[in-house]
């Protein structure tokens, strides 16, 4: 009996040790001048959430590796500015874009609530808009998967109609790739499948764009300051950003029965010489006082990803296994 108890104790201790090794750890830390940041890590990947401003996820990377998110060095570590600061990273806005209300400053401290798999970063109510924004991150205990829920609550005295709009700013020098809805053939498939939306400054002749039958790619060129933007709808919204052999993937689900901003966009991508943004949008919703809307994204990182020739066949060979892996991770 003593031997059996000893063996059982050994097994239990080993199981606990394995679980501890795989656990998600949240710790308060400094980051590039900010004294109050929080690091969430499972030992393989890490993300940094700011508490002095935000809510922002300012870093997402393999532990000790390159930050795939854009950072503005001159804006890091600062707070209290009167006007909105780009800073970098991942944030949540309201859509459609309003030059005043959408760009409301987020330069004050946020509340951090630690959870078993990550945290919730909640800003105070914006005096300009009556909106309150928060970001919840939940990291898988192993692997690179993170679920990120972006919420906006209406604390105004009257209903507001808007969409949650998630903007992730990517570092310079990479390439974004997103997919169109499943393709078909004429005359078997006669119905339209999705909008492809332009802005006044969109130039489809710009060499940073590349269109194939299945994919749209956009190069971030630090030497080209002309802004470019396109939007589209895809029920299964996904986008990769590939930089220096690593890939960031974000996914979201869109509902074709609902109305989306900007002529029906569930995904938008923007670039200039400083950064590239990959953006997902929720449906337009009439949000009553006290109600909240949210947009959920699933993130993953991949190593050893090299972009081939930008053709359907070559891109599918590289991207399809990664998309399949991300679906399996979400199911778990």
Image (cartoon, rainbow, N blue to C red):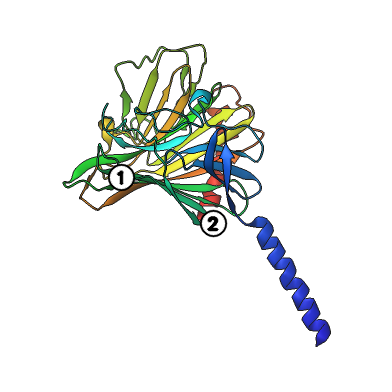
What SS does tag 1 mark?
loop
For the C terminus, the image quarter is bottom right
Identity of the residue furthest to the right in this view: 3
What x and y, as percent, mark residue 145?
55, 47
Looking at the image, which residue is at 73% across and 69% down?
13
- Report whether 230 appears left or right of 117: left
Identity of the residue furthest to the left in this view: 158
Of pointers 1 and 2, the one earlier in the residue sequence: 1
What SS does tag 2 mark?
loop
- Picture quadrant of residue 277: top left
Q: Residue 125's mark? A: 1
- Report whether 175 appears left or right of 159: right
Q: Residue 145's mark? A: none
Residue assigned mark 2: 332
Residue 240 in sight from this viewpoint:
yes
Residue 191 in sight from this viewpoint:
no
Looking at the image, which residue is at 34% across and 27% down?
83
Viewer-nearest residue: 229 or 316: 229
Viewer-nearest residue: 60 or 50: 50
- Report whether 48 appears left or right of 255: right
């Amino acid at each position: 009996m003593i031997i059996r108890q000893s063996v059982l104790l050994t097994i239990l201790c080993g199981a606990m040790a394995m679980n501890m090794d795989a656990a998600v750890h949240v710790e308060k830390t400094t980051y590039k001048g900010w004294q109050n940041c929080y690091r969430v890590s499972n030992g393989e990947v890490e993300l940094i959430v700011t508490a002095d401003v935000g809510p922002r996820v300012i870093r997402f990377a393999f532990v000790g590796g390159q930050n795939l998110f854009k950072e503005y060095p001159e804006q890091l570590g600062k707070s209290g500015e009167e006007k909105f600061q780009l800073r970098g990273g991942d944030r949540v806005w309201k859509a459609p874009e309003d030059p005043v209300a959408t760009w409301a400053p987020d330069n004050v401290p946020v509340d951090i609530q630690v959870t078993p798999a990550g945290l919730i970063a909640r800003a105070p109510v914006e005096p300009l808009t009556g909106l309150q924004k928060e970001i919840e991150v939940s990291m898988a205990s192993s692997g690179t998967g993170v679920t990120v829920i972006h919420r906006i609550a209406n604390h105004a005295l009257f209903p507001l109609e808007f969409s949650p709009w998630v903007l992730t700013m990517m570092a310079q020098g990479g390439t974004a790739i997103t997919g169109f809805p499943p393709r078909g053939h004429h005359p078997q498939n006669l119905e339209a499948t999705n909008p492809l939306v332009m802005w006044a400054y969109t130039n489809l002749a710009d060499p940073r764009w590349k269109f194939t039958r299945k994919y749209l790619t956009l190069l971030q060129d630090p030497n080209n300051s002309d802004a470019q933007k396109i939007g589209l709808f895809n029920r299964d919204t996904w986008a990769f950003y590939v930089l220096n052999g690593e890939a960031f993937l974000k996914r979201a689900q869109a509902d074709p029965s609902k109305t989306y901003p900007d002529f029906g966009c569930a995904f938008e991508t923007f670039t200039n010489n400083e950064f590239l943004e990959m953006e997902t949008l929720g449906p337009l919703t009439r949000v009553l006082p006290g109600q909240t809307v949210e947009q959920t994204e699933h993130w993953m990182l991949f190593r050893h990803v090299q972009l081939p020739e930008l053709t359907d066949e070559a891109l599918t060979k590289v991207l399809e296994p990664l998309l399949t892996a991300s679906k399996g991770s979400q199911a778990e």
